[in-house]
Image (cartoon, rainbow, N blue to C red):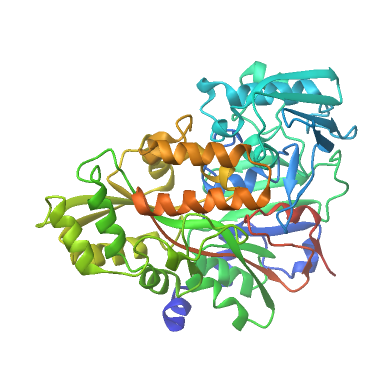
Amino acid sequence: MVQHLTRKLLSGMTLAAMLGIAAVPLQASAATLHMAWSQDATGLDPHKQTAFSSLRLLELIYEPLVRVDANLQIVPAIAESWQFSADGKELSFKLNPKAKFQNGAAVTSADVKASFERILDEKTGAAARANFLSIASIDTPDPATVVFHLSQPDVPILTAMSDVNAAIVPASEITAGSVGTKAVGSGPFKLDKWDPNAKEVLSANRDWAGGATGVDGIEISVLPDETAILAALRTKQIDFALLNDPLVATLVPKEASLQLNRVPVLAYHVLQLNPSRKPMTELKVRQAISCAIDRQEVLDTASLGEGKVTGPLTIPSLATDPSQLFCYKRDVEKAKKLMAEAGFADGFSATVIGATGEPPTAAAEAQVIQSQLAEIGVKLDIKMMELNVYVDAWLKGDFDMAVALNGGRADPYTMYNRYWTKSGNLQKVANYIDDTLDSQMQQGRAETDPAKRKAIFAEFEKHLAEVSPWIWLYTSYSYTAQQKNVAGFVPTPTGTLFSLSKVTIQQ
């Protein structure tokens, strides 16, 4: 494998041309962090984007009210403080008086109100809309104070507000209809230039309320071949890189001049079935597929074992041991029996879609699943798509099955309500809901006792695995690689690159 990868590496001179920088030592450009990743953003509207590549860019430009740190704790962002009322039905924020947008305007309560009204407007198509349906009204008693009045106690709403999908955008940009056509946030960096699928140029936001950034700017090159990224790191043309492919990431520690940051993440690899399409409409067919899949083999083959088999919940403090969930030990005979009972003893044909490059393991996952399901008569056709085409089909639920890498969250309600509640705004993606799932989600949303919440979501996880609308596979790692003179980056379970705001390049 190493020899194969080595043969693919590009020369330093060729890479320099691709990256648009001179092949000179890092110290000559210490004020700018040269960075690379393999997938570019698919859009600039923080409220609509679902692709990881978009979120990683936008979280450097936009800010939510609060953030989640490396320990999954809520910390200030635009808001410097917050408080729930005694009955849990009112959530008040005090904004940081230093917060400014990159156009120089102060961030005010009017911008917060306008941003959440935009998210809640069905016409927006906001990715996180379902997280905020408890908001009954929003008051702005003064420019620095925002009060959310809730229709019911909503424990996870604060966690939901930490996501870049809940970023605060200028009310003026909303009025002008320019959100998504240009990027005006209040985050640590400004987007000066975006050449889609080629390069982004970011400069430090001197007005950022979070203080001075560690570098004057970030130049991001989009290199679809991660072996080329590794080559650029080796030749010191790149300071920092986001890696998705474990085949490449596991080579980084072999380079004396490089450092690999590797941390388990909440995001999960999953085979999504479409229960609105026959024969996945049949419970026993879905269960048969679950029983036929060897999750550990998928992990070992597609990701070199870099991860662990998971159930629906990936938050360590809440996750159930997968061995306790329905059919997590492969049982082909049981799968065949279920197929026969459902009337499909001879199997059926279906198509599974995947995105090229996000994750890089998608094609390999599909191939292993194709081989495993063939043993119970399911004939899978694999259709790989460019990321933007895949996302469009995924959002429309236009697939029989899909291999996906979906984002995790620090709270299970925030993570899953958009799929598995009757008011969820991504029901077209999930195409399945039942009274039990909806009830469990609503109970977990309102319950304030941690032990009781854990019990509720344990039952939720058990039921979801049993009805098998999706087949959860495994969680993996977030990988970033850097030169050893790059300091200050803190990897987190959410995969965010936000701490690039404080990274420095040592001389």
- Residue lying furthest right in this view? 97
Can residue 395 be seen here? no
Query: Relative to residue 297, is residue 185 depicted above or below?
Result: above
Relative placement, left or right, of 343 versus 246 is left
Relative placement, left or right, of 80 versus 40 is right
Query: Relative to residue 11, is residue 84 depicted above or below?
Result: above
Q: If the image is split into quadrants, where does the N terminus sit?
A: bottom left
The picture places residue 304, in percent across and down from the top left corner, at 45, 75
Tell me the residue at 42%/69% (across/down): 299
Can residue 405 be seen here? yes
**The quadrant where residue 390 appears:** top left
Q: Nearer the viewer, residue 479 or 430?
A: 430
Tag count: 0
Relative placement, left or right, of 99 versus 162 is right
The picture places residue 399, in percent across and down from the top left corner, at 30, 43
Tell me the residue at 77%/18% (across/down): 139
**The quadrant where residue 152 appears:** top right
Tell me the residue at 47%/63% (across/down): 310
Tell me the residue at 64%/59% (across/down): 493
Q: If the image is split into quadrants, where does the C terminus sit?
A: bottom right
**The quadrant where residue 4 appears:** bottom left
Query: Relative to residue 337, is residue 105 depicted above or below?
Result: above
The picture places residue 19, in percent across and down from the top left corner, at 60, 58
- Residue lying furthest left in this view? 346
The picture places residue 357, in percent across and down from the top left corner, at 44, 57
Q: Nearer the viewer, residue 140 or 244?
A: 140
Q: Nearer the viewer, residue 263 or 238?
A: 263
